[in-house]
Each structure stands twice: as C-alpha cells, then as structure tokens.
Amino acid sequence: MQPSLTKKIFIYVGAALLALVIAVPVLWLFIMSISSSTHLTTLPLQWWPDAPTLENYKSLLVYAENSPSASFLYGIRNSIIIAFAATAVSIAAAIPGAYSFSRLPGPRRKNLLFAVIAIFMLPPVAIVLPLYTVMSALGLLNTHFALIIVYCSILLPFTTWLLKSNFDTIPGDLDEAPIIDGANRLQAIWYVILPIARPALGAAIMMAVLLAWDEFFYGLLFTNDIRAKTITVAIADLAAGRVADYGLISAAGILAAVPPVVLAFFMQKTLVSGLASGSVKG
Amino acid sequence: MSSVSLFNVTKAFGEANIIKGVDLKVEDGELVVFVGPSGCGKSTLLRMISGLEEITAGEIHLGDKRVDPLPASDRDIAMVFQSYALYPHMTVAENIGFPLKMAGWSKADIATKIREIGEVLQLLPLFDRTPKQLSGGQRQRVAIGRALARDPKIILLDEPLSNLDAALRVDMRMELARLHRQLSATMIYVTHDQVEAMTMADRIVVLRDGIVEQVGSPLDLYLAPVNQFVAGFIGSPKMNFWPAQTDDAGRVIMPTGQAVLIDDGCAPNQSVTVGARPEHLVLCDSAADAALTGTVLSVEHLGSDTFVQLHCGIGAPDQIDINVRLAGIVRVSIGDQLSLTNADANAWHLFGQDGKRMNKIAI
C-alpha cells in the first residue's frame, strides 16, 4: 500500500528535524573550529567566518613541547592505546564468558550473570574511592594499565551481556554439530559460533571502543600528565586555563571524533551483513 | 567392528528418570529405528550414544570399546540433526569438508573426498552455495554428506525427514535406505513416524517412558506385539481394541454374545481386551454369525481400499468406534448396518488386564 501524501510529508519533516538536531551541533562545532578567536567573540555573531582558518588544527597537530598540541597528541595516543587494549581484553574475556552463560547449565551461573549486571549498574562514583586507593597502593596511578583495568570493568559486563544475548539466538544444534564433527569446544566457538555472531561481535567491539573513548570520570581522576591523560581529559584541560580558546577546543573535539568514525566506517559492512543473514532451518 | 551395545543405560535429570535402564545391541551394519511417542526418550537415548548427553549409569560400547566416558568428538560417530545444523556461513563444500578439516586432513585430500561425496549425493552443482540458497531436500542431503565425510562406521539420524514435505520424505526415505545398503554402515534412526520405522528398519525399538517395550523386525512387531501399547503404536490406521470375556473352553465371547476363536491366548473365564487391525476385519453375511455389528459413521474411498468407521453398540459405557479397512471398492454408505467377523484365527490379538499379550494355553 502506498502511504498517503500527508503521511509521507510527515515522515520527511520528522526525518529532517531529526537530522537537524543531530547535525547542527556538529556543524556548529566545525564552524567554531575554523574561526579565529576574535571572530568568535565579535558581536553580532556571524554564521560563517569572514576568513576561515585552519590555524586551530595546525596548533593541535603540529607538535611543540608544553603546548596544547603536546597534550592533545599524547591524549590521542593514550586514548587509542587504552581504548583498544581495554576492548581487546574485554572481548577476549567476554567471548568465553558469554558462551558459558548462554550454553552451559546451572543456577549458580545464572546468579553470577545477574551479579555482573548489578555491578555494571553501580555508578562509577560509588567505587571510585576504593579503586583509587588500590591503584595508588599498587603504584599504578597515571599509567595506561590502570585505566585499561578499570575500563575493562565497565566494558566486560556490557560486552558479555551483548554477546550472550546474541549467542542465545544461535540454535544449540549448531554447537553440537561441530563437536560431533570432531571439534573441541574452543574450535566449535572459533569456527562456528563466532563467524555466525560476527555482526554482534562487531557491534560489541565498536560500542566498547566508544565507551572507553568517551570515558571521562576515571580518566580525570587516575591520570595527571601527558603520559596517561586520555583525549577527553586533554580537551577538558584546554578549557581549564584562564582564557578558554573555544576555537581550539572545537578543533580538538572534531579531531577526537575521527578515530571512532574511521572505525565505524570500516566496521559498517560487518554490522550490516548480520542484519541480512537468514536462519538455518528449512 | 561397529556394533553398538547398551548395558543398563539410564538417564536422570534431577529427580526425573528419562531413560530407565536400556539394554540393547545394534549389530554391525544394521539399521535400527527408535520409535515412540514424543517424550518417550528416543532422542535422549540417541544423544547419549552420540556423547552429546552424559549417561547417569550403565555402559555404552562401540564394538569392543567402552565409549561412555569419552567426549562426543572422540567417539567417531556421525550424526544428522533434525534441523540439519548446517553451518550458515560456510558453502556446501566447506560444510561437508568441516569434519575432515577438524581431523587435520590436507586441503588436497579434503577436496578429493568431498567431490566423491558430492557425486554420490548429487551435490556437485551446489558446492559453492550457502545453506540459505538451498531447498529443504538439498539441505538434508548436505547434512547427510557432512555425516558421511569421515567414513563413519556408525551414523545416528535424529528425525532427519521431519522438516520435509510428504513427497520429498518418501524420496529421501528411499535414498537413505539405498545409502545404508551402499555404505553398509550401522545406522540408528529416530522417528515418531511408524511408517518410516516400518519401511526402513531392519529392527525397530519401540520406546515408551524411557523403557524399551519391544525390539524386533517390523513384521514381528506387526504380527506379535508384546503388549497393547506396541499393538496400538505399530500399524496405520491403528489397531481396534474392545473388551471381551473368555468362556470355560477359552473361546472369546464377544460383547454381542458371539463366540470367536483366537489362536493366541485364551485362559478360561477372564476379562480380556481384543485387538484387531482394521485390515483383519471382514464383512459377513448374516448378523447372527457376526462378532461385531455397527452403523457406518463415515466412509473413505481410496480406490485400492475403503476405510469405514463403524459405531458399535459395545464397550459401554464408552461406545466404541471401530475402523475397518476393506480391500478394493466396497459400496457402503453412511447409516448402513454392517456385520463383521474375523477371517483368520491368527489375525486377532488378546491382551490381559495388564495390557500384556496373552499366549495360548493348552486346554
């Protein structure tokens, strides 16, 4: 049935509004990032700068010691290391964990799953003090390792839950068949379950990287210089001086979004392929 | 040696006993069918032989080797699943080659072997397709191909035809029977369809509530069921049952008062259940000689046979309807009165109060 004209108009207007709400802040951020600081403070405000400049990007990307660029570039490096390492560790642990929750029997296992979720629900503020004490006692403050460990505690419950609910949809016959075919349990997971769950795995990896990339609270508390400061903290630092350079902050915001966007671009195919694949039964 | 022996095998899930002590020997090269109503434990028993389900007690031997402590992957048994369980992300060729890959075969050897199987099962043109591009029958053949890959000596099939439509099912049934002859592998086949069981099996194992009720060739089960359950389960349409008495001479006195001779069983002066298959009831001319009389409720003309359902005034308080299979075309219509009797003293069965077959007692 063809939708009526009013319905069509309604849908398009709605879609346009949604796009506007999502796109306008990004657009604004971009405009600010190519404006000079004088331009940003001129009244009345202009929609488009008279002399667009890439000066802000340059001062972030061209390395100079003790400058915003140092803190920014180190921040990017630290965030990449921490987000990807935490994701790798979490996924590596979540796959067997989720498989076990999904496939193996036992009431204690089920209780454990709820414990995992309950811990995930705890606000970070509730556990930050004990964590800080522990990290401090172990001499791990201001290291990548500390943040990787802490981020794993956030990512692991999330990825486990996500993968578990996807494994649940895979028919049990499909991990019994490889065992009959001579595979052991790990081979069954590697050759059969994971390829089938690839879209969910892709989604889990992406969400995990994003969660870690965007994390601010622990990053702020557990790091104090460029050796371990993450990008979110570095950007906040740009705003913390006596004079906040909004152009610079905007440019940093745009640049900080690049790695996740690149990741999403490359994983897009994996994510979509899952939506199209059918079931096995005939 | 690829016989399968079960010794007092039991399975309990918590308090619930699913399999209650099964002893069975499946001979080398035999095709044995497990049959029974849903929930009788036939699939569980198959899974226990495969190793996918642990056994609670007892022993399972393949040939001379005890296998129940071994994991499924070490038993060298192939299995065809009801859902086929094809790997959706692999092509047909990869599906069939997967067990060989797991066994560490070289790529060249795998390619040769799967071509061989592809030829036998006419799958070669489909080798590059994925399971979702196949029809139900093709998927079934791929599943069988995967099971054959390692030249297994024992193949387990768990209701392999139940997802196919009726016509395809008959074809695949013949194909499986042909494969069994060709491979001379031992096969254990689970089904709830007694026609499949009768047509394919060398021997049938009838299960109920985790107990083996009877083991025998299809005709053994048809001709001499050991109890009322097996009698009712094997044969289609079902055997008719009605209550009767035996007299001093061991003749069976029908509810109509007519006395009939039944070769099997006949302890004098007892309440018994008479069992007669629809094809073992014949029309008789006079109501006086009839063992049963009734009014026709429905008639189905199949050409080769005529199925008649009769409402008989026996077995009060539950009035019993009797199914009759008359050979050829018989002109009867609804409401007619029919008289029936037994043509052959061998053909009817007697069951005691406990449901067990009664055997002939010399008088």
Image (cartoon, coloured by chain):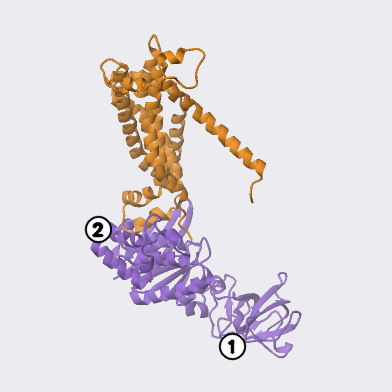
Q: Residues within 10 Å of mark 2 (few under 14, many from 20)?
A: few
The answer to which of B249 and B346 lies nearer the viewer is: B346
Q: Are marks 1 and 2 in contact (CB under 8 Å)?
A: no
Identify the secondary structure beneath mark 2.
loop
Image quarter of the N terminus of chain B = bottom left
**Percent coordinates x, y for residue A257 in the rendering:** 39, 29
Whichever of callouts 1 and 2 sits on the residue coming sooner in the sequence is: 2
Q: CA distance from mark 1 to mark 2?
A: 62 Å
Answer with left or right where residue B362 lies relative to residue B323. Answer: left
Q: How many marks?
A: 2
Where residue B16 is drawn, which disc sits there?
none
Relative to A176, say whether A64 is above or below: above
Where residue B104 is drawn, which disc sits there?
2
Relative to B237, say whether A179 is above or below: above
Name the amino acid type tagged 1.
Asp
Q: Residue furthest top?
A: A242
Identify the secondary structure beneath mark 1.
loop
Q: Residue at x 29, y 25 (%)?
A: A144
**Percent coordinates x, y for residue B175 in the rendering:** 42, 74
Q: Quadrant of residue B82?
A: bottom left
Q: Residue at x 23, y 60 (%)?
A: B106
Which of the chains bears the disc numbered 1? B
Residue, disc 1 = B344
**Percent coordinates x, y for residue B111 in the rendering:** 27, 64
Image quarter of the C terminus of chain B = bottom right
Question: Which is in the foreground here, disc 1 or disc 2?
Answer: 2
Residue under disc 1 on the same chain as residue under disc 2: yes
Relative to B207, say whether A118 is above or below: above
Q: Colour of chain A?
A: orange
